[in-house]
Every structure is written in structure tokens, then in C-alpha cells.
Image (cartoon, rainbow, N blue to C red):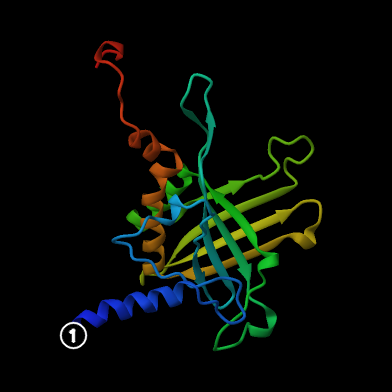
Amino acid sequence: MVSSAALQPRAVHALQCALRHKRLPGRQHVMLVRNYATEEPLSTQAKPVYANFSVYKGKAALSLRVRKPRWTEMGEGGFNLERPGALMLELAPVSPESANSTGSRSYIWDRKQTFMLSPMELGGLIEAVTDKKPMKELFHDPGKGRPGDGGKISKTLTLQLLGEKGDWFLGLDVKDATNRENSVKLGLPITGAELHTMKTLSEFLIPRLVGWDEVLAVPDVGSSSSRGPM
């Protein structure tokens, strides 16, 4: 006779196997249940992995996603950082049909506006949250460096503290000098908890966006005679 204690792990394993291959109705993905203590991380699999952090409010939604650093292989072996990573901010307006809804809302993501935060600019966000003061206004010219495109579109990102309750307001002002109808202002309130989460994510990201995690992951096996003065 098998005890109930012995049956429990088998039942859990059977449920995990079933959920791994269960296709959800109306969706093009499968539910994946992972045992983090025993399974290999998703990054070891030859498949892309996506994960966003999103905030949904009455007039707009904010989604954060990571752009990985880019590496180039050196002729003598090894890799060199070609382009640091960044954090992409995407803001989308709420759809007019659900703007006044008290339930679930929908957002127009094909009209989203984006703003790419560099590691240094993420440091400015961390400073603002830590010191509880407005973040220095960030200005981007997406066409800078391309002949004929500089100055056509400008983007300004602001993060302001609202009163003394610890809430903030994130605003993005996009100006199109070639077509004023394409100019738009988007913004949404950010709670202290939401901004603290963004701060924690930024602190985690900065060394990885500049590639230092990869540098430290490779042991220094050079001989002592090949090293410079300490």
C-alpha cells in the first residue's frame, strides 16, 4: 500500500507535466511551470526570453523592457563591448472607449511613444528616488547624428514628485517639427512602491548593461608576470 505522503510528489509532478504542455484557450503560448531548484535557467535554452514590467493607469500605461548590450568578437580572441545596454520605456495612451471605465482598460500600443534610458540616466532616476527630488529633465533627439534628421523629433522625459504623499508623475513630451499633429504628451502617476520597484530594477541592471557581469564571470588566468603594477 502506498501512503498519501508518497502520492503527493507524484501528483505534483503529474500536474506540472500537464501544465507544461497545456495550451491556453485563445492564446499562442503555453503555460510553463518550472522547478527553480532543479531545472536549468531559461537563458541556457536556445530560445528568446521576454519579460516586461508594466504599470497601468487611467490615462496611459507604462512598460519597461531591457535592450541587451551588444558584443563584438575580437581578432585575438575574447569579446569587446560594442554598445551598452539600455532600459526602454514605452508609454501608450488609453483607448477612448475605456478612458472612463472603472473596470479593465485597453491601451493603444500601436500609438506608443518610446524613450531609451542609458545606464547613466538610470543613475539619475536612482538619485531622484533616493533623494526624493525631481529627476533632471532628460532630452533626446532620435535623429541626432543622421544627416538631415537632427532636430526633427525631440523627446523630453520628466519625473516630478507630487506633494508630500510620496507619489510621482512620469511625463513624456514628444515634439515633431515636421508635423505638429504627430506631437503628443503622455504621462501617468507613479506610486512610491512602483517607483521603488523601478529603482531596484535599475540598480540591478546598471552593471549588467555596461557588461561588468560578463567581465567578472570570466576568471583572470594570466600569469603574474604578465600583470601590470598594482
Q: Quadrant of residue 176?
A: bottom right
Viewer-closest of 170 and 91: 91
Viewer-closest of 69 and 29: 29
In the rendered structure, the answer to whether residue 8 lies left or right of residue 32 reads left
Viewer-closest of 165 and 195: 195
Query: What's the residue at 81%, 51% (across, down)?
Result: 178
Residue identifier under label 1:
3
Query: What's the residue at 52%, 73% (across, down)?
Result: 56
Query: What's the residue at 73%, 60% (across, down)?
Result: 183
Give the answer, above or below, for where 61 lies relative to 89.
below
Expressed as whole percent of the image width and height from the top left, the position of residue 130 reads 33, 55
Callout 1 secondary element: loop
Q: Residue 114, can we see it?
A: yes
In the rendered structure, the answer to whether residue 180 lies left or right of residue 15 reads right
Query: What's the residue at 61%, 86% (across, down)?
Result: 100
Q: Residue 127, can we see it?
A: no
**Few, some or many residues within 10 Å of mark 1 (<14, 14–19, 20+):** few
